[in-house]
Amino acid sequence: MNDPRNDSGGVSVRREGPVAVLAIDRVHKHNALSPVILQQLDTQLTLLQDAPEVRVLVLTGEGERAFIAGNDIEHLAQVEAHEAFALMESGQRLVSRLRNYSKPVVAMINGYALGGGLELALACDFIVASRRASFGFPEIRLNTFPGWGGTQLAVRAIGLARAKEMIMSGRRYSAEEAWEMGLVNRLCDPAGLRRETLAFATSLIERDATCLSLAKRLCNGAEDWTFADGLASEAALYGVNFSREQARDGLRAFLGKSGERNNG
């Protein structure tokens, strides 16, 4: 078996003030994911989690053709069943970590977002896409199916009927189609993708970090909890947040501005 580490690529991290941009760098393979890249992503997520100066993460792929074109098919075709199972578990751990990350994560989609790449994008909180981006789960054409949480994430993102069609047809969707079905939060021209993504990420920094983290936890939980449990969790975390002076500061600031307007 070929050693995937011989052509594994890497992950670069660039800082844009309080925004950290993580980029998959394996351009000649359309940024296909290798085991080494998965490990590097996991390591960087740990480092950035512990960096208080980093408020928002942006995940993207180097080059102009691909965000992430999926798993490394050349490597996957050579593994045995038990190795395939272990690889799926490894990818699912990363997907779960992204989905539950305490800081907002924005996927910046510059090209192909296929298979495992789409699964990572769906695990992010927001997707900003270039109009030349494309999306899909081509696995069914290879006699398999998504294994990093795609069946679960797609249903949650676009509903059961559309998710079944996307996964079971294996076809590729344009950026406009992804936008129309609610898969994408922002759609922009290719030349403005980076600018628009960083502007969106920066807008999140204006919000209180703890409130963002709690709101994210509640929104994610809404997909799994009963309505009653969701309401109970919302009230409980509201109380937790209200124990912070920042919550009352925000209300006082609003009242102060409102008073100024009324007196003006």
Image (cartoon, grey):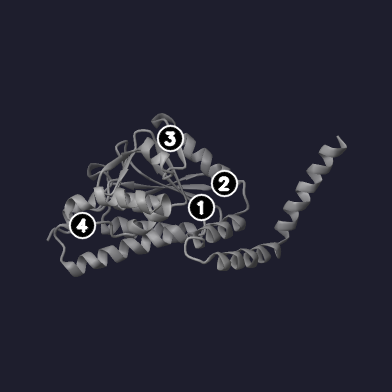
Which of the two labelled residues, at mark 1 and mark 4, occupies the earlier sequence position? 1
- Closer-to-camera residue (179/63): 179
Q: Is residue 190 above or below residue 219?
A: above
- Does the residue at mark 1 contact the one at mark 3 (Cβ under 8 Å)? no
Q: CA distance from mark 1 to mark 4?
A: 32 Å
Mark closer to the observer (1, 4): 4
- Disc 3 packing (10 Å; few <14; some 14–19; many ≥20): many
Q: Which residue is mark 3?
A: 193
> Which SS class for mark 3?
helix
Q: Quadrant of residue 2?
A: bottom left
- Amino acid at circle 1: Pro
Quadrant of image for the C terminus? top right
Q: CA distance from mark 4 to mark 2?
A: 38 Å
* Rendered residue at 84%/38% (across/down): 262
Q: Evaluate whether residue 228 shows in this view.
A: yes
Q: Which residue is mark 4?
A: 144
- Disc 2 packing (10 Å; few <14; some 14–19; many ≥20): some
Which of the two labelled residues, at mark 2 and mark 1, occupies the earlier sequence position? 1
| Relative image position of residue 153 (x, y in whole percent) | 38, 56
Label at residue 95: none
- Does the residue at mark 1 contact the one at mark 4 (Cβ under 8 Å)? no
| Relative image position of residue 81 (x, y in whole percent) | 17, 67
Q: Which residue is mark 1?
A: 104
| Relative image position of residue 195 (x, y in whole percent) | 48, 34
Q: Which residue is mark 2?
A: 204
- Amino acid at circle 2: Leu
Image-based side of 153 in relation to 71, left or right: right
Q: CA distance from mark 2 to mark 1?
A: 8 Å
Which of the two labelled residues, at mark 4 and mark 2, occupies the earlier sequence position? 4
